[in-house]
Amino acid sequence: MHIRDDDDAGGEPEFSMAPMIDVVFQLLIFFMVTATFTSEEQELGVELPTAQSGEAAGGSPQELVINVFKDGRVSFGGRTVDELELERELDAAARNNRATPVTIRGDRLASHERIVAVMDACGLAGLSNLALGTRD
């Protein structure tokens, strides 16, 4: 059996770029996918209050997120809703599953009355698994 020697190869060894390009593309896809999860919260313009004690959100797919802006507007499902529309949406969610978690993300300058009104709408719909969104 003849074992090939480097001198028999007839040239310099080659460096294959294909595996490195594959790894770079995988990393690029990973960072693009993870960046899209956080962009939803940044686009809304809600400045959350800070809290020392708290737990990271579970991020379950059926979780409802309601945003209360400092000017009193309420956003649900990516669109601004009035009180009646919010109540209808919450009633529909409660009919599907009364244990559906609801996170209320109120701007730190939003009126307390507005946030309580959203909590009240959740309670009237039968949703009691409520959480208030904060940042560390």
Image (tube, helix red, strand yellow):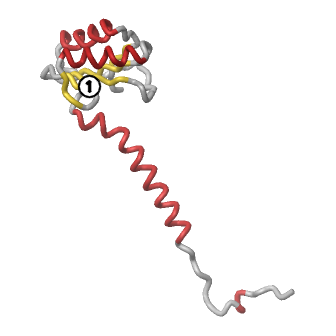
Residue at horizontal 27 percent and vertical 36 percent from the top? 42
User: Is residue 103 found left or right of 113 in the rendered image?
Assistant: right
Question: x, y percentage for residue 127?
Answer: 37, 11
In the image, residue 2 sits, relative to residue 112, either above or below, namely: below
Question: x, y percentage for residue 125?
Answer: 32, 10
Which quadrant would residue 104 be assigned to in this image?
top left
Q: Mark 1: which secondary structure?
A: strand
Which quadrant would residue 9 be assigned to in this image?
bottom right
Amino acid under disc 1 = Phe
Question: x, y percentage for residue 36?
Answer: 36, 43
Which quadrant would residue 55 be assigned to in this image?
top left
Q: Quadrant of the N terminus?
A: bottom right
In the image, residue 19 sits, relative to residue 33, either above or below, namely: below
Residue 109 or residue 94, whichever sits in front:
94
User: Is residue 56 found left or right of 81 in the rendered image?
Assistant: right
Residue at horizontal 51 percent and vertical 63 percent from the top? 22
Residue 10 or residue 77, whichever sits in front:
77
In the image, residue 109 sits, relative to residue 27, either above or below, namely: above
Q: Which residue is mark 1?
A: 76
Residue at horizontal 40 percent and vertical 13 percent from the top? 129
Q: Quadrant of the C terminus?
A: top left
Question: x, y percentage for residue 88?
Answer: 26, 16
